[in-house]
Amino acid sequence: MKVLYFAWVRERVGKAEEEIAPPEGVGTVAELMDWLAGRGEEYAHAFENRRVIRAALDQAHAKPDTAIAGAREIAFFPPMTGG
């Protein structure tokens, strides 16, 4: 699965994208964020306030309880504002 990071999430993780293979038991967006947060200090910092991070699965907005099975791409980004 390809993971894309945007804005300050990207800055904290230190990369714009990567390929990952989540372990068994990681089945939702929220579980994926928890798993990513455990991958190192930079990830923990990026995902320290998961309630404000938004996600999109295959370019469609997804809620924390959305299943990730079958997704080719997931993107994480901060809330967007208009203007």
Image: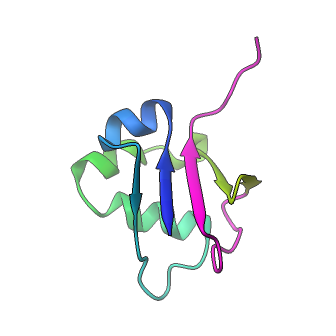
The range drawn in magenta is 63-83
- Residue 28: image x %, image y %? 61, 72
Q: Nearer the viewer, residue 8 or 73?
A: 73
Task: Give x and y (percent) for residue 36.
Answer: 39, 62
- Residue at 29%, 40% in the rendered image: 14
Check if residue 14 falls in the magenta segment: no
Instruction: State the predominant SS element of the stretch in magenta.
Output: loop
Answer whether residue 77 is magenta in the image: yes
Residue furthest toward the bottom?
A: 24
> Which residue is rendered at x = 76% and y = 11% of the image?
83
> Looking at the image, is 64 positioned above or below residue 45?
below
Q: How many marks?
A: 0
Measured as percent of width and height from the top left, residue 76 is found at: 55, 47
In the displayed structure, does residue 74 sit left or right of residue 40?
right
Residue 5 pos. (x, y %): 47, 44
Which residue sits furthest left? Answer: 41
Query: Given the current orientation, which residue lies at the most extreme top position?
Result: 83
- For the residue pair 54 and 73, the one nearer the viewer reads as 73
For the residue pair 37 and 76, the one nearer the viewer reads as 76
| Looking at the image, residue 42 lies above or below residue 21 | above
Q: Is residue 68 left or right of residue 34?
A: right
User: Which residue is drawn at the image coordinates 52% and 70% (left, top)?
Assistant: 31
> How has the structure been colored for display?
rainbow
Q: Quadrant of residue 63?
A: bottom right
Please tell me which residue is depicted at 57% across the width and 64% down the height of the picture. 30
